[in-house]
Image (cartoon, helix red, strand yellow):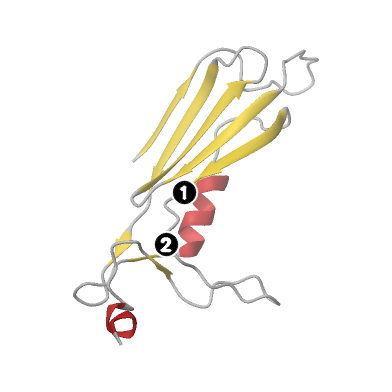
């Protein structure tokens, strides 16, 4: 599901001069979707909202995973001009874990979701 609500002149037309207040972005990364909201930094008015669902993967019973590349892509799939965004805040589910290769920047495995029981036996030992 992709949905966007745009209020006001957020998309900029090429070859035109625009005066726009600075913007602040907010990324809300949940277990099933990513939302990106854009606010006017001076007034607090929400100018744009974009939401993308994240597919959950269940490779075994009790395991919940997500593709880290899909999560990253969901954050960068915006329908607005971001040139005036001066700051971005992030809220996330904190319990989901991704391990990245420090040299390539690629994930070593899927993101292990907060509802997955991958490590329960290890923790019980």
- Front residue of this view, candidates 102 and 54: 102
Q: Position of residue 115 (x, y in %)?
A: 28, 62
Question: Residue at 33% across / 80% down in the picture?
Answer: 123
**In this rendering, is residue 25 above or below 68?**
above
Identify the secondary structure beneath mark 2: loop
Circle number at residue 67: none
| Residue assigned mark 1 | 92
- Front residue of this view, candidates 114 and 32: 114
- Give left or right: position of 53 versus 82: left
Instruction: State the residue lying farthest toward the front.
Output: 125
- Give left or right: position of 80 versus 115: right
Q: Where does the N terminus fall, quadrant-wise?
A: top left
Q: Where does the C terminus fall, quadrant-wise?
A: bottom left
- Front residue of this view, candidates 3 and 47: 47
| Residue assigned mark 2 | 96
Instruction: State the residue lying farthest toward the bottom.
Output: 125
> How many C-alpha atoms fall within 10 Å of the one at disc 1: few (<14), some, or many (≥20)?
few
Please give the count of numbered marks on the rendered protein.
2
The reply to whether discs 1 and 2 touch (Cβ–Cβ < 8 Å) is yes
Question: Residue at 37% across / 52% down in the picture?
Answer: 54
**In this rendering, is residue 95 above or below 23?**
below
Question: Residue at 33% across / 78% down in the picture?
Answer: 119
Identify the secondary structure beneath mark 1: loop
């Amino acid at each position: 599901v992709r949905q966007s609500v745009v209020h006001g002149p957020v998309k900029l037309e090429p070859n035109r001069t625009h005066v726009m207040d600075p913007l602040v972005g907010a990324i809300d990364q949940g277990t099933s979707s990513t939302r990106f909201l854009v606010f006017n930094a001076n007034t607090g008015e929400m100018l744009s909202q974009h939401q993308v669902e994240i597919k959950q993967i269940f490779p075994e019973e009790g395991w919940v995973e997500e593709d880290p590349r899909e999560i990253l892509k969901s954050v960068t799939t915006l329908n607005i001009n971001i040139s005036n965004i001066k700051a971005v805040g992030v809220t996330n589910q904190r319990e989901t874990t991704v391990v990245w290769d420090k040299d390539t920047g690629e994930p070593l495995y899927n993101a292990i979701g907060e509802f997955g029981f991958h490590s329960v036996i290890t923790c019980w030992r």
